Amino acid sequence: MAKSMTGFASCEGGADGLSWSWEIRGVNARGLDVRLRLPDRAQALEAPVRTRVGAAVARGSVQIGLRLKTAGGAVSGGVD
């Protein structure tokens, strides 16, 4: 298990007319602070994402964002 981290990662994927892009940013911090930016339609992912981050990282400030894009081009969610 990582004790703390500083880093950035992103990944993209898609299926069935929907594409997604995840971004995660982490910096060292005393405790574990997880901040999520999820589109309204993906709020059910919040608890499982927090559980996975907590299992992998002991401390740090972690920002996670998800962007969804439909085949029609509508975009929702994301990180600034």
Image (cartoon, rainbow, N blue to C red):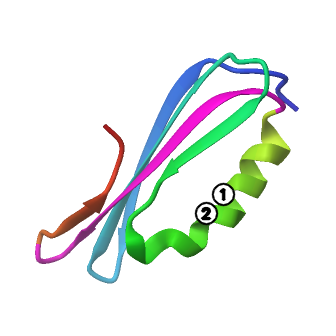
Residue at which label 1 appears? 49
Compared with residue 75, is residue 10 higher up or lower down, i.e. above or below? Answer: above
Q: Residue 37 at x, y = what percent?
A: 45, 52
The residue type indicated by label 1 comes to Val
Let me know if residue 10 is in the magenta part: no
Image quarter hosting the N terminus: top right
Q: In the image as oriented, which residue stretches furthest toward the left?
A: 72
Q: What is the magenta range?
A: 58-72
Q: Quadrant of residue 62?
A: top right
Asked whether residue 62 is drawn in magenta, I would say yes
Which residue is identified by label 2?
A: 46
Which one is in front, 43 or 17? 43
* Crowd band around label 2 with a 10 angstrom C-alpha radius: few (<14), some (14–19), many (20+): few
Residue visible at 69% across and 20% down in the picture: 5
Q: Residue at x 70, y 64 (%)?
A: 48
In which image quadrant can residue 71 be found?
bottom left
State if disc 2 and disc 1 touch (CB < 8 Å): yes
Q: Is residue 12 left or right of residue 61?
A: left
Of circles 1 and 2, the one toward us is: 2
Residue 58: x, y in percent?
84, 31
